Image (cartoon, grey):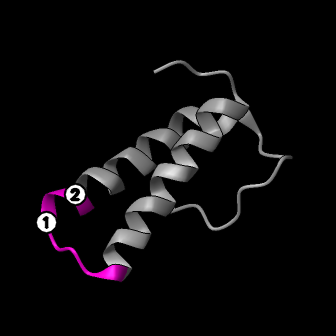
């Protein structure tokens, strides 16, 4: 998970960052654990993915 995403995010890193975030998200979802902390981590990953895609104009 990326620690700090801000408006100054460099879109040149988007490809690698998205790949890493999506892998982490898939791994967490595959675990199937539904603790509050687990769900918060999933939400944070989804938000990070959305932020990068929106900021860098990447379509699904």
What percent of the width, then of the height, locates residue 54? 66, 31
Instruction: Report which residue position mark 1 lands on.
Output: 32
Location of residue 30 with respect to 11 vertically, above or below: below
Q: Which residues are magenta?
A: 28-36
Marking on residue 29: 2
Location of residue 55 with respect to 23 vertically, above or below: above
Location of residue 18 with respect to 39 vertically, above or below: above
Circle 2/circle 1 CB separation < 8 Å = yes
Q: Residues within 10 Å of mark 1 (few under 14, many from 20)?
A: few
Location of residue 25 with respect to 35 vertically, above or below: above
Residue 51: quarter of image? top right
What percent of the width, then of the height, locates residue 52? 63, 39
Residue 36: quarter of image? bottom left
Is 38 left, or right, of 6 in this rendering?
left
At horizontal 21% and vertical 74% (from top left) the residue drawn is 34
Q: Quadrant of the C terminus?
A: top left
What percent of the width, then of the height, locates residue 19? 42, 40
Magenta stretch: includes residue 46:
no
Q: Nearer the viewer, residue 32 or 9?
A: 32
């Amino acid at each position: 998970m990326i620690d700090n995403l801000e408006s100054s995010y460099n879109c040149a890193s988007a490809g690698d960052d998205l790949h890493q975030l999506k892998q982490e998200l898939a791994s967490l979802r595959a675990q199937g654990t539904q603790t509050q902390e687990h769900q918060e981590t999933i939400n944070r990953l989804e938000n990070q993915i959305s932020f990068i895609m929106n900021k860098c104009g990447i379509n699904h």
